[in-house]
Each structure stands twice: as C-alpha cells, then as structure tokens.
Image (spheres, rainbow, N blue to C red):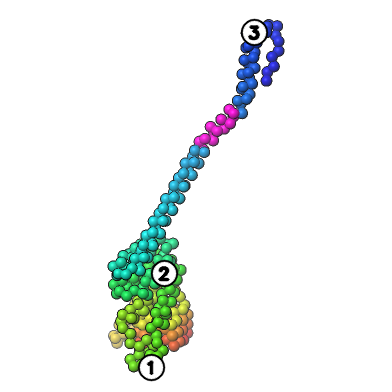
Amino acid sequence: MTRWVPDKNFPLTIPNYRYVKLKLETEILARQLKPRYFLLEVAKAIAGPVAVLGLMWTIVVGISQQGALQQSKEDERFDKAVTRLAGPSPTERLTGLAGLQLFLEPEYKSRHRGTLSFLVNALASESDATVRGALLDTFSRLTRLDVNQSVMNETLERLRDQNRSLLALRKDPSLATAKGNDETGMGQLSQEDLAPLRATATAIAVLIRHGAVTQDLSEIYCESCDFSGKTLDMSRPDYANTANFAQWHGADLSETDFHNAILKNANFTGLFLRGASFDSADLIRAKFAGADCRGRS
C-alpha cells in the first residue's frame, strides 16, 4: 500500500486529504480484488473446454442410454420369439421360428449360440411336419448366415445329445428278439414316433456337410443320413469308370467314433474316414464309394 508523504507543494488541506484518502482506498480495493480478478480470468479461460467436455459427456450418456434401450428391445423380441416357439399351435411356433431366424443374421453374432440351442430343443420335440421342415431349412442355411465355427460345432454336439436321448427313449431291450424287429432294438415304431429322431439325424448330417466337427458320433440314430451330400448312380455298370472319386472328397470324419451307431443306408461317399471307428455299428447298405477308409475299424 502506498504511504502518503507530506509535500510542501501539496499542503494537507481538507480537499487534498479527501483526495489522498480516496486514492489510498482505491489502491486497497484494487489489491483486494486482484485474486478474484485472477480467478475470474481463469474461469473465463476454462469455460470453453469445460463446456465442450460437458457436451461430450452428454453425448456419451445419450448414446449409452440409447444402446441400453435398444438392447432391452432386442431382449424383449428374443423372449417373445422363444415363447412363441414353444406355443400350442403350429402357426404360433412358425411365428416364433421366424422371429428367432432374425437373430441368426450376422449382426446378432452374440445371440447365435443361444438361438441355435433353442432351435435344437424345438426340433427334438416338434410333432408337426411343417414346423419340422422349417426348422431343418433353418439349419441348412447356417453357413450362409456366417455362423461361427465353434458355435456350429457346439450345435452339432447338442443335436447328437438330443438324438441319443430320443433313441434311448425308444429302445426297448425286450424287443431285441421280437418279430419284425429291425435289429435296432426299437421294434416297429410309427412314422410319427420316429419323426423327431429322424429330424435330429437329418440335422446332424446337414451340419456335418456344412463343416461342423465332432469326433464323437457314437450311439446315434442316423439311418439314411447323407454325410456327403453327393449322389452316385451305382446301378450303372460303368459307374466305377465314370466317377472321378478324387474330386469327391468332402467332410473330414477321420478319427470319428461311430461305435454302436445306427447307420443303415447312410451315405459316406467320398469322405475322409481315416481311423474312424465303426465298432458294433449298423452299416447295412451304407455307401462308402470313393471314401478314404484307411485305418478304419
């Protein structure tokens, strides 16, 4: 603070005293306001960036809330489709299937595993032929939907397990020597009773043709399953000369365990079966033309 020093040229009269007092008070006030002025300037300087950060935060929160809302809507749609898939009427089940098919599109990869799990269970229990056909058509389109390989493999294993369970329910040891038994221990079952079992078998073959892999296909029912997806007219006398088996190799089922499997009329044409095990399997009229069976047991 400036200290007033008497000056002979500036006599301390009342007007002069008031001037000096006012000057001193002004200096004191300026010193007191200086920190506040500094803070005000700092506030002005950071106001812009703070406003930008605030805007960015608002945008992030908005996007997050929008994503959560979208997720909630997807969950609701998924749950409704699953509920309809288990509905009492074929029409309702077809509607549920159509809803779940949307979740097999590439943009819903995180839902592929769960969706296919529900579809496998539905196929194993479906009693309506139209709905079964629509379910099988869905499995046949999986490669075009860009389903992950690991999910394909897991789906194949679920189908295998459902197939085994259905076969176990229909097997009856007391029928082993019954008249008309087809050597499978199931006796003479109606087409309706066999339909879910055959549907899971068809789906197993479809996934294998599309590249799904598992080395345990033991104790499955897969009568007339077409693992190769290829046909060969063996009724022609020259089929062995006209068929180029070198170009027929498809799925690799090497080292696969088929023991105790029911594979009557199954088609393994042109497949790799090196080291595959068919111990005690039913292979009546199974086709192995052009298959690489080296080391097969």
- Determine whether the residue tagged by mark 2 lies in a helix, strand or loop: helix
- Amino acid type of the residue tagged 2 in the rendering: Ser
Which residue position holds label 2? 117
In the rendered view, tell whether residue 15 sits above or below residue 118.
Answer: above
Q: Give the Cα separation between the discs numbered 2 and 3.
A: 101 Å
Coordinates of residue 66 in the picture (x, y in percent): 42, 50
Q: Quadrant of the N terminus?
A: top right
Give the residues drawn in magenta, as a range: 36-49
Return the disc, 2 or 3, that comes first in the chain's sequence. Answer: 3
Name the residue that disc number 3 marks.
Answer: 14
Residue 202 visible? no
Q: What's the residue type where badge 3 is placed?
A: Ile
Tell me where residue 130 appears, x and y as whole percent: 29, 72
Q: Main secondary structure of the magenta part?
A: helix
Q: Which residue is mark 1?
A: 177
The answer to whether residue 280 is left or right of residue 265 is: right
Q: Position of residue 241 (x, y in %)?
A: 33, 84
Q: Tell me the residue at 31%/80% (across/down).
A: 192
